Image (cartoon, rainbow, N blue to C red):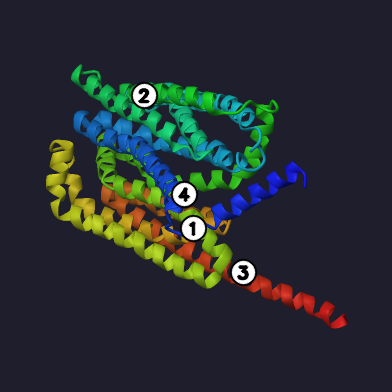
Amino acid sequence: MPIGIENGEATKVETVEENSAPLFSRRFIVEKFFPWMMKGGLALLDFGLFSGSNFLMGILLARWMVPEQYGAYALVFSIFILVTFLYQALLLEPISVFSGTTYSHNLRGYLKSNFWLHWGISAVICVVMAAIAIGAKVWWHSPAAAMGFAGMTAATPFILIHGLGRRSFYLKLSPGPAAFGSSFYCILVVAGSFGLYKFGWLSAFSAFLAMGFAALVGGVIMLIQLNAKLEPATASMHASETWNKHWNYGKWALGTCIVGWVPTYVYIPVVSKFFGLAMAAELRALMNLGGPVLQTYAALSMLFLPFAARVQGTQGRLASNGLTRKLTALFVAGALAYWMVLIPFRRPIFDLLYAGKYINASSLLPLFAAETVIWSAALGPAIVLRAMEYPRALFFANGAASVVAVVFGIPATRYFGLRGVIWSMVIANVFYVAVAFILLEKKLHEAESMPKKIAVSRQPEEAAV
């Protein structure tokens, strides 16, 4: 027998033996369990370093800044969140998909085209943000907001490329270098803000510059590591080709990002318009306390999404219904437990975190907690709908909440202030949850009836045979 065939059979036997290793055997634990635990732990560390540093920044800036400057930071940061949503829809999410399918054999060439695409998108964002900064100075007569938008204009390209670097390492399931780069971001952004505070230079403008510098350092470190790890490109790619594929993929995700931003973050610009930046700072101080819940649930959603996809694909409608109920109960129970600890101590917590500022806003914390709990109830159906490859449903659910935010929320904010804002958020999330569950039930019924329709359509052919 030829040697080539012998080697082929030997390789096949080894592969079968490797895949059939008993669960919890020493070989399984060493070769499968420990490596995945390490990767999962590094992914959580990366997520915690980046998101946790931004959360900590929100607390420290509220403590160190005067209310007007912190209100300007909150206003600009709410717009920055919208920018990151759009960037994720047009660049980061498509990269996660196409890197494992269309361009899996030319990852370097694909990422290089995305690198140039990043600078094109960043240039458009910078022009828009610079125009907003000028508008804030000339028409809104708000120097603090104008300088905040100027700082965001300078920092945005570097913060976004830091996100591109982090996502690129996950394409090969290698979160370690991403966590390494995020550690530099965390250290530099906190230390830089503290240094600015000590020298008396801290403002909305300088805070964004600190974020941009920290992201630049972390991004350069990740790009150097990425360049060393990637295999040589097999073909050159034009940015226009990449853009066309990304746009065709990301259109619905882009719309979902926009309508998903409105029910929560539109109120900061609205409050700034009606009552000034100081009240916007109070709203942001309230929203900061919901950060741990939101960040934790974002990480858990990434964990549960592939599991929900497997359940949907292998077990069908009843299993998906059961999974939706379990996930909803888990997220709601977690939010309730979190707020039950915080609410009784809300005044001491506000005093500790914000150095005695924004104490009046602490009375609204129970109502804001209710908004967070209701929003948590939507995560169960949202995960299952994504697993069923039906992202349009989330666009419609968020669209319903956005309509409430615009039609009811803006007048409520004008006449009732922060209390009107929180009540509007509560009502908007009730609509979001209701529409999400209705569309999930409709989709599950469609999935259940599809095999029956196919069977009925085949009966005449079978009878004829």
What mark, if any, has residue 446 been given in the picture? 3
Q: In which quarter of the image is residue 329?
A: bottom left
Q: Mark 1 points at which residue?
A: 307
Instruction: Please name whichever residue, 456 or 105, is drawn nearer the observer in this view of the structure.
Output: 105
The relative height of residue 72 versus residue 405 in the rendered view (above or below) is: above
Q: Mark 4 points at which residue?
A: 32
Percent coordinates x, y for residue 140 in the rendering: 37, 28
Q: In which quarter of the image is residue 81?
A: top left
Q: Quadrant of residue 204?
A: top left
Residue type at numbered disc 1: Phe
| Element type at mark 1 | helix
Percent coordinates x, y for residue 40 in the rendering: 41, 45
From the image, state whether disc 3 or disc 2 is nearer to you. 2
- Alpha carbon separation for disc pair 2 and 4: 35 Å
How crowded pointer 2 is (Cα within 10 Å; few <14, some 14-19, many 20+) is rated as: many
- Image point 19% across, 52% down: which residue? 342
Residue type at numbered disc 3: Glu
Instruction: Please name whichever residue, 99 or 54, is drawn nearer the observer in this view of the structure.
Output: 99
Residue type at numbered disc 4: Lys
Apparent side of residue 31 relative to residue 94 in the rendered image (left or right): left
Which of the marked residues, 3 or 2, is nearer the chain's N terminus?
2
The relative height of residue 366 versus residue 295 in the rendered view (above or below) is: below
Instruction: Please name whichever residue, 435 or 303, is drawn nearer the observer in this view of the structure.
Output: 303
Q: Residue furthest front?
A: 1
Pointer 3 with pointer 2, Cβ within 8 A: no
| Element type at mark 3 | helix
